[in-house]
Amino acid sequence: MKRFISVLFVLGVIALFVCVSACNTTKGFGTDVEKAGASMKGSAERNGAE
């Protein structure tokens, strides 16, 4: 039983680290998409799109 709890704890810690790192990755991806959208909007405005 002690071994099961230890393994469960280790898996929980690993899952926590994965979730925390994923949050930073998602935030960075959102920033990249926002910049791409702004660039496309600027290009459309320069080329006369409505």
Image (cartoon, helix red, strand yellow):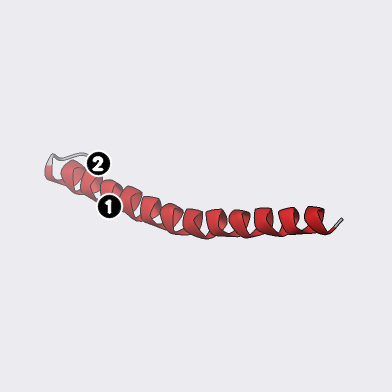
Q: How many marks?
A: 2
- What is the x, y in percent for residue 29? 38, 50
| Residue drawn at (87%, 55%) of the image | 1
Position of 18 with respect to 46 (left or right) is right
Along the line of sight, the residue nearer the viewer: 16 or 27: 16
**Crowding at label 2, few (<14), some or many (≥20) Cα neighbours within 10 Å?**
few
Based on the displayed image, in which of its 4 quarters is residue 14 positioned? bottom right
| Residue drawn at (45%, 53%) of the image | 26
- What is the x, y in percent for residue 45? 18, 46
Between marks 2 and 1 in the image, the one whose residue lies nearer the viewer = 1
Position of 6 with respect to 38 (left or right) is right
Q: Which residue is under mark 1?
A: 35
- What is the x, y in percent for residue 13? 63, 60
Q: Secondary structure at mark 2?
A: loop
Residue type marked 2:
Glu
| Residue drawn at (52%, 60%) of the image | 20
| Residue drawn at (49%, 53%) of the image | 22
Residue type marked 1:
Lys
Q: Which residue is under mark 2?
A: 50
User: Quick one: label 2 or label 1, which is nearer the N terminus?
Assistant: 1
Using the image, determine if residue 40 lies above or below residue 28.
Answer: above
**Crowding at label 1, few (<14), some or many (≥20) Cα neighbours within 10 Å?**
few
**Separation (CA) of disc 2 from disc 1:** 20 Å
Along the line of sight, the residue nearer the viewer: 1 or 28: 1
Along the line of sight, the residue nearer the viewer: 42 or 13: 13
Using the image, determine if residue 27 lies above or below residue 47.
Answer: below
- What is the x, y in percent for residue 35? 27, 52
Position of 31 with respect to 6 (left or right) is left
Q: Secondary structure at mark 1?
A: helix
Q: Residue furthest left?
A: 46
The C terminus sits in image quarter: top left
Marks 2 and 1 in Cβ contact (< 8 Å): no
